[in-house]
C-alpha cells in the first residue's frame, strides 16, 4: 500500500477524480461534491510519504495562479459567481441569496483549481472523454432495459406528459447524452483508442446506440441540442474537406430521421402528440396545468420582473420572492409557481441588462479566447448549453453547473497547456 501511495502522481489522481465526477453526474450528488472537494485539495497540497509530515502546501500553487491570471478564460468564469454576489447590496432575502451563492461557488473555485492542477496531454484529455462515452453508454443500456421491463406503463404515462425514468433529471441526462454522442464522433474522427485499434467498433456501436436511444428517450431539449450539434459538425466537415456531397446527404438523412422516429418509436410519437396537444390548450387559454404552458407563463413572469427592474434587476436573492408575487397577482389560477424556464430571462430578471451583458460575455469569452472556437468539441459544448438556456435554468442547479463547468474546464486546462507549449 505504501509503495502504491508513493508511486501515484497528482495527475493520475486528477484523472481519477475526473472520471469519478463523470459517474457522479449521473448517479450521486454526494460523490459529485466529494469529487469537487478533491480538486480543491489536489490543487492546494502535495505529499511526500517519506517525509516526517507528508502533506505539504503545493509549492507550485503560485505558478498555477500565474497561469490562472495569464490565461484569461479562467478568471472570466468567476463572473458567474460575482453576478450573484453583487446583488447582496440590494437583495432582502438573505437565505435564498446564500443558496444561490453556494450553488455558484464552483465558478469561483474550480477555475483556479484547474489552472493549478497538472495540465492534460491530448491523450489524457481524450481518455477522460473516452470514459464519458463508456459510462453514459452503459447507463443508457440500463435505462433502456428498465423502460423495456415496464414498457406499457411508462409509454402510457408519456401520453400524459411524463418522461421515461432516468438516473438523473431527464433533461440534464439528455443533454449529457447529446454531448456524449458528439464526443464519440470526435474520438472516432481522431482515431483515438486506449490500446487496440479494434476499439473503434465498440465506440461506433455506442454512438449509434446512443443516437437511437435519444429518440426513444424523446426529451426535446436533448434532441434539439443533438441536432444543432450534428448540423454544426456537418458544416465543420464541409469547411475542412470541401467535400459537399457526403455532408449534404447526411443532413438530408438527419431531416428524415424525426419523421421515421414518429412512425416507428411509440415514446417519440407520444411526446410529439402531447406537445401538440399542450400547445393547443395554451392557444385556447386553458393550458395552465400543462408543462409547456407552464413554461411559457414562467417566461412571461420573468420578463415582467425584468422589464420592471431593467438596469440592475430585482436582485438574485429576491427573484424567487418576486416570481411568487407576480404569480399571485397575474396568474392566480396556476397552482404551482415556476422560476423562469430560460437562463437569460432569469439573469435579466435578477441582474438586469447590466448583469445580462456580463453573463453573455462570461459565457462566450472562453470560446472566443485564443481562437478556442477552432476546437469543434468546445463549440458543441457551448451549442448544447446555449440551446438548453432557451428552455431551462441550466446553471441554476448543481448538476447543470457541474456538467457545464467540468467539461469546459478540462478543455481549457488542455488548451492552456497547448498555448504554453507553443
Image: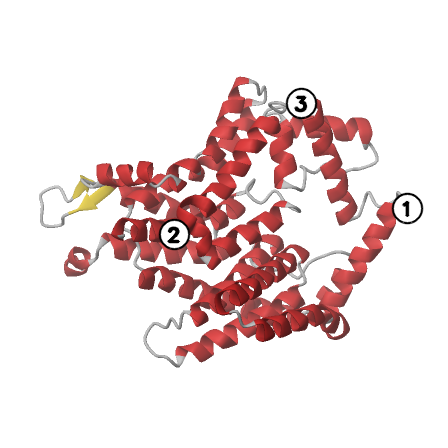
Residue located 65% across and 36% down the image: 345
Q: Name the residue under label 2.
A: 410
Identify the image quadrant of the N terminus: bottom left
Could you give the CA–CA distance between mark 3 and mark 1, rounded to whole angstroms? 31 Å
Residue 282 visible, this angle:
yes
Residue 336 visible, this angle:
no
Whether label 1 touches label 2, CB < 8 Å: no
* For marks 3 and 2 on the same chain, the one whose residue lies earlier in the sequence: 3
- Residue 293 placement (x, y as % from top left): 79, 45
Could you give the CA–CA distance between mark 3 and mark 2, rounded to whole angstroms? 37 Å
Q: Residues within 10 Å of mark 3 (few under 14, many from 20)?
A: some
> Tag on residue 284?
1
Q: How crowded is mark 2: few (under 14 residues within 10 Å), some or many (20 or more)?
A: many
Which residue extends farthest bottom?
A: 198
Between residues 68 and 235, which one lies in front from this camera angle?
235
Name the quadrant containing residue 338.
top right
> Tag on residue 309?
3
Helix, strand or loop at mark 2: helix
Name the quadrant containing residue 106.
top left
Helix, strand or loop at mark 3: loop
Whether label 3 touches label 1, CB < 8 Å: no
Amino acid at each position: 500500500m505504501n509503495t502504491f501511495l508513493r508511486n501515484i502522481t497528482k495527475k493520475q489522481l486528477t484523472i481519477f477524480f475526473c472520471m469519478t465526477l463523470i459517474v457522479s453526474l449521473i448517479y450521486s450528488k454526494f460523490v459529485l461534491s466529494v469529487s469537487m472537494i478533491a480538486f480543491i485539495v489536489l490543487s492546494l497540497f502535495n505529499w511526500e510519504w517519506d517525509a516526517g509530515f507528508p502533506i505539504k502546501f503545493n509549492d507550485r500553487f503560485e505558478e498555477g495562479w500565474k497561469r490562472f491570471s495569464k490565461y484569461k478564460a479562467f478568471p472570466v468564469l468567476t463572473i458567474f459567481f460575482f453576478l450573484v454576489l453583487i446583488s447582496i447590496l440590494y437583495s432582502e432575502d438573505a437565505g435564498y441569496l446564500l443558496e444561490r451563492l453556494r450553488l455558484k461557488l464552483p465558478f469561483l473555485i474550480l477555475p483556479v483549481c484547474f489552472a493549478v492542477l497538472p495540465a492534460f496531454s491530448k491523450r489524457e484529455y481524450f481518455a477522460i472523454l473516452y470514459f464519458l462515452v463508456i459510462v453514459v453508454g452503459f447507463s443508457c443500456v440500463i435505462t433502456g432495459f428498465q423502460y423495456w421491463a415496464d414498457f406499457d406503463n411508462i409509454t402510457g404515462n408519456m401520453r400524459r406528459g411524463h418522461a421515461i425514468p432516468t438516473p438523473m433529471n431527464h433533461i440534464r441526462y439528455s443533454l449529457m447524452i447529446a454531448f456524449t454522442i458528439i464526443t464519440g464522433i470526435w474520438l472516432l474522427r481522431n482515431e483515438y483508442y486506449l490500446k487496440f485499434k479494434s476499439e473503434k467498433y465498440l465506440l461506433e456501436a455506442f454512438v449509434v446506440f446512443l443516437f437511437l436511444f435519444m429518440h426513444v428517450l424523446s426529451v426535446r431539449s436533448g434532441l434539439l441540442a443533438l441536432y444543432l450539434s450534428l448540423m454544426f459538425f456537418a458544416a465543420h466537415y464541409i469547411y475542412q474537406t470541401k467535400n459537399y456531397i457526403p455532408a449534404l446527404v447526411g443532413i438530408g438523412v438527419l431531416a428524415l430521421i424525426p419523421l421515421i422516429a414518429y412512425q416507428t418509436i411509440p415514446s417519440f410519437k407520444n411526446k410529439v402528440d402531447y406537445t401538440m396537444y399542450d400547445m393547443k390548450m395554451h392557444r385556447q387559454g386553458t393550458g395552465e396545468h400543462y408543462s409547456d404552458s407552464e413554461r411559457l407563463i414562467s417566461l412571461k413572469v420573468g420578463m415582467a420582473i425584468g422589464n420592471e427592474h431593467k438596469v440592475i434587476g430585482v436582485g438574485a436573492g429576491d427573484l424567487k420572492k418576486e416570481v411568487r408575487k407576480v404569480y399571485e397577482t397575474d396568474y392566480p389560477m396556476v397552482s404551482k409557481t415556476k422560476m423562469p424556464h430560460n437562463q437569460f430571462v432569469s439573469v435579466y430578471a435578477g441582474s438586469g441588462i447590466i448583469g445580462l451583458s456580463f453573463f453573455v460575455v462570461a459565457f462566450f469569452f472562453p470560446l472566443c479566447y485564443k481562437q478556442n472556437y477552432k476546437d469543434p468539441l468546445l463549440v458543441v459544448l457551448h451549442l448544447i448549453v446555449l440551446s438548453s438556456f432557451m428552455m431551462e435554468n441550466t446553471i441554476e442547479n448543481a448538476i447543470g453547473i457541474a456538467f457545464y463547468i467540468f467539461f469546459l474546464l478540462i478543455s481549457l486546462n488542455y488548451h492552456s497547456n497547448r498555448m504554453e507549449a507553443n
